[in-house]
Structures are given as C-alpha cells and as structure tokens.
Amino acid sequence: MLVLRGLAFIGEKWQRANIAISDSGYIVRIWRSSYVNRQILSKVDAIYNASEYLIIPGLVDVHVHFREPGEEYKEDFATGSKAALASGITTVGDMPNNRPPIDSLENFKKKLQIVSKNAYTDFFLYVMLTSPSELSNIYKKYGSVPVKVYLYHRNSIENLFKWSLPRELLYVFHAEHPEYVTDHNKAKDAHELDSIRPIQAELKGLDVAIKFAMENKCRVHITHVTSYAVVKEIAEARKKGIRITCDVTPHHLVFFLERINPRSPLYKVLPPIRNRDAHISLIKAVARGLVDAIASDHAPHSHKEKECDFSEAPPGIAGIQYLLPLLYSISKVTNIDFELLVRMASENPARIFGIRKKGRIKVGNLADLVVFDPKCKEVIDPDKSLSKATQHPYNGMLVRGKVIATFLRGRLVYENEYITSKSGTYVWECN
C-alpha cells in the first residue's frame, strides 16, 4: 500500500490529508491527522510526502488529436500521452479524424489495437458521425463511445436529421455552421480568419445541436466555445431541460487578436482566436461557472507545416504538456478560481463523458493524482517538449506552477520531468 501526504483538493476544498492507495490502484482510505493505527501502518509499503505541494485529481482531457494512425509524423500516441502526463493529465479522449477516419467498427477496432500498445495515459476514443448501423455496432461492443460531429462538413446536418441515430451516445459538436464559414485557406491572417469564421457561425451551429438534442432526445456537448454569447444560449437551453454541456480551450482563455502576431500561423486554429471583447466575455462566463469543462484541443502539426504562410498552414494549436500550469497562471491573472478550473479539468469532464471512478479524490476512486508545485515559475522551453509538436504560441511564455509527479491508478508514471512507467489503458476496461 502507498500513502500520499499533502494538501489535497478533496470535494471542493483543500485539506491536509493522507491518501492510502491499494496495490490495485484504488483510494482505500483518506484521513487528516498524522496518526495512523498499527493495522493500517503494517500494510503501508511506501509514503510519498508531498507536504510542500498540492495534490490534485488527475486531469481528464476530453479533446486531443494524437494523430495515430495516419499522421504519426505530427504526433503519435506515445509522444502525445507522455506530454499529457507531464501536465498531470491521466485520461485523454482522442479525436477520430485520423487517416483513415474512425467511421466504422473495423476502423475503431484497428485504432484501439494500435494505440493500446503505445498509451502512457488512460484513454478513450471518439467515432466520427457515421451510419446508424456502424454506431450501433460500436455501441454494442464498446459502450457509450462519444460521437464527433464536424458540423462544417456539409453533409453532417442532413445526416443528423435523416438518420435514426442511437440516443444512448454523447454527440460532441464542433459547432461551426457550414453556411456561415469560409475555407480557412482564404484567410491571410488571424483577423481575416475571425471574420470568415465568425461567432455567428458558432451560434447557428449551436441552434442545430439544440434542435438535434430535442428531436433525438439525447445528450450533446459543444466543444471549444469562444464567446459568452454561445455560452449564454447553452445556459438558456439547459434551463429548458435540454441535456447540453460545453467546454473551452486554454488558448481561447489566453490569447486574443489584439495581443498576438496575426500573421503567425502558430495562432491559426478553428474556431479562431477572437478579439479582446469576446476574450474577456468568455473569461467572465468561466468565472461565473457557466462553462462545464476545459479541454486542450491539442492539435499538433510538424515544424514545417507551422512555419509557412498563414493561409497555407493547417489549423490547430498544440500545448497539452502545459495545460495545468496554464490553468494555474490563468487563475492568477483573472478572477477565475483555481479550484473551479481544477474541477473543470477533472471532475466535470469525467462526469460528462461517463468515465467512472476518475476525476475526484475520494475513497473508491482510482488513484489518479497529481503533485503540483504552485510556487514554481518556468519559461516554456521547446527543447523540453515530450510532444513532437514543438511549434506553438506558448513557447517563451512564463507560466506559474509545475507538475512534480503524476500517479496513474496508484502507479508513479511521471516525476521531475521523467516518465517512470507505462501503464495506460482503454478506460472502459480499467473500471
């Protein structure tokens, strides 16, 4: 039995605690005092003293692109999941826009076989919006796999309402309506991209998602929202009984148009970086608790792909390795409580995506734990990247806080910038 000692985020508050972890990786007891009876002490094999640091639940990042299979030159599951551990992320949800796309039971099984051998974190996999028969087959074999709806694909809206889709699944929307967006390659800089992929496109896409949720009587989740206007409409829909949730990304909380080099392809992402007013309104929405979750939307590209002209570059911002320090830094320069951000990156995504026994420090849960130093300050250095994607806008940024150690199901898998163990698994198999 392993015991972690330190200031832990338990429930909604910090408390000095001893966390006892069984050999099978579950939290079996939590107590506050330094006293422990002999019966428990006799079972303890090791004590990890984190007294100078914070103990946080392992983060659950429900939106990553680890590019495997098909584009391993950008990233693969090993490099991506190693980078995730360095930021205290113990579970990831990998997107299905691979090559080939994950749009059938056969392709899903092949991807699962490949990434299971390479995962350093626990993980789950998305499936593309595809035919009802394929979704039903995947559901029967693998349970409630989330379905990604790229709404800007012009046939997506027609298929949503033409097909009789399984109601048991969670439908996750990239909610940019195809009639309100232009090809990102037509934008010469970030200002033009914001103009041709406006907030209105997200609002119109949200209308489609809400209509689908009502007619299909299912749950929907809107990913990477960029504006309070979108969040407000989601909150209103929820009041009407619609089962809808949403997340934001760190890059939309950190960057705004007036602050960046608009011609740099490092800032090219979909939905786009917005102006200062939209940025501030989004921060206010998060601070008020109107946003459910935070996800990295880690979208790596090769060095060459991110050093060309803005119009030619593929969209996407990497940076999964820095998620937790970024969140802590955001809390220090805004009015967003760090405790709220922790819940948005751990407990809430685990609940929304049905990942059992994760996201909270409590007896009976898996011991996914992060030891975090809030006093440390570091400049993000691409030479320390565990990801293949070293070209991103966070390079050179000063961030507060550092992950000292990450435990996955009670096993120390990362410590002091080194990967110490490999034990990732498909999450529906570890509960």
Image: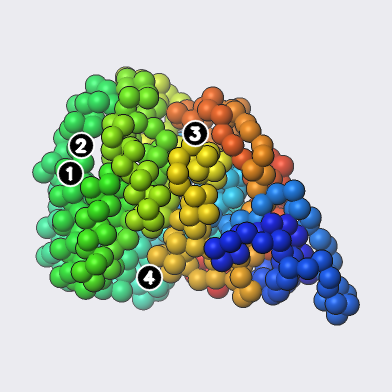
Mark 4 element type: loop
Amino acid type at image mark 3: Ala
Amino acid type at image mark 1: Ala
Extreme residue toward the front, this view: 335
How many marks the image carries: the answer is: 4
Q: In which quarter of the image is the N terminus?
A: bottom right
Mark 3 element type: loop
Q: How far apart are marks 3 and 4 (CA)?
A: 31 Å
Quarter of the view holding residue 284 = top left
Q: Distance between the residues labelled 3 and 1?
A: 29 Å
Q: How far apart are marks 4 and 2 (CA)?
A: 31 Å
Which residue sits at x=29%, y=55%? 222
Task: Residue under label 1, please give it.
Answer: 201
* Whole-percent x, y for residue 41 in the image: 86, 73
Task: Residue under label 2, please give it.
Answer: 197
Task: Residue under label 4, please give it.
Answer: 144
Q: Nearer the viewer, mark 4 or mark 1?
A: 1
Q: Which of marks 4 and 1 is nearer the N terminus?
A: 4
* Whole-percent x, y for residue 202 in the image: 21, 46
Mark 2 element type: loop
Which residue sits at x=67%, y=61%? 15
CB under 8 Å between discs 3 and 1? no
